[in-house]
Image (cartoon, rainbow, N blue to C red):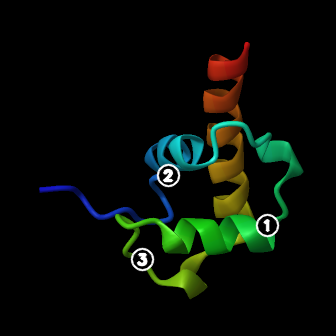
Amino acid sequence: MTQKLKWTDAEEIALQLEEKFPDLDPLTVRFPDLHRWVCELPDFEDDPKASSEGKLEAVQMAWLEEYRDTHG
């Protein structure tokens, strides 16, 4: 059984976003788009309103780490 994701699961969210958008530089993503994409992930099950700028930034930075690992 897959664990449902919460806003605090930045690393796992980042992995899923990297799989979904492999060639997209996370630093080019606006927070409204990032928020929508996280909420649309199949395993995401948290209150969309529980998001904050800090939580979105944590997701973006974790995604950036994954992106840099993949793209050198």
Mark 2, Cα crowd under 10 Å, few <14 / some 14-19 / many 20+, is many
Image position of 14 (left or right of 9): right
Image position of 23 (left or right of 45): right
Which of disc 1 and disc 2 is earlier in sequence? 2
Q: Secondary structure at mark 2?
A: helix
| Residue 13 percent across, percent down from the top left | 49, 52
Please tell me whether residue 37 is drawn above or below residue 50 in the rendered image: above
Residue tagged by mark 1? 31
Q: Residue at x 53, y 74 (%)?
A: 39
Q: How far apart, in angstroms, are the residues tagged by discs 2 and 1?
A: 14 Å
Q: Residue at x 84, y 63 (%)?
A: 30
Residue tagged by mark 2? 13
For the C terminus, give its image quadrant: top right
Q: Residue at x 71, y 35 (%)?
A: 64
Please tell me whether residue 50 is drawn above or below residue 31 in the rendered image: below
Q: How far apart, in angstroms, are the residues tagged by discs 3 and 2?
A: 12 Å
Type of the residue with mark 2: Ile
Please tell me whether residue 71 is drawn above or below residue 54 in the rendered image: above
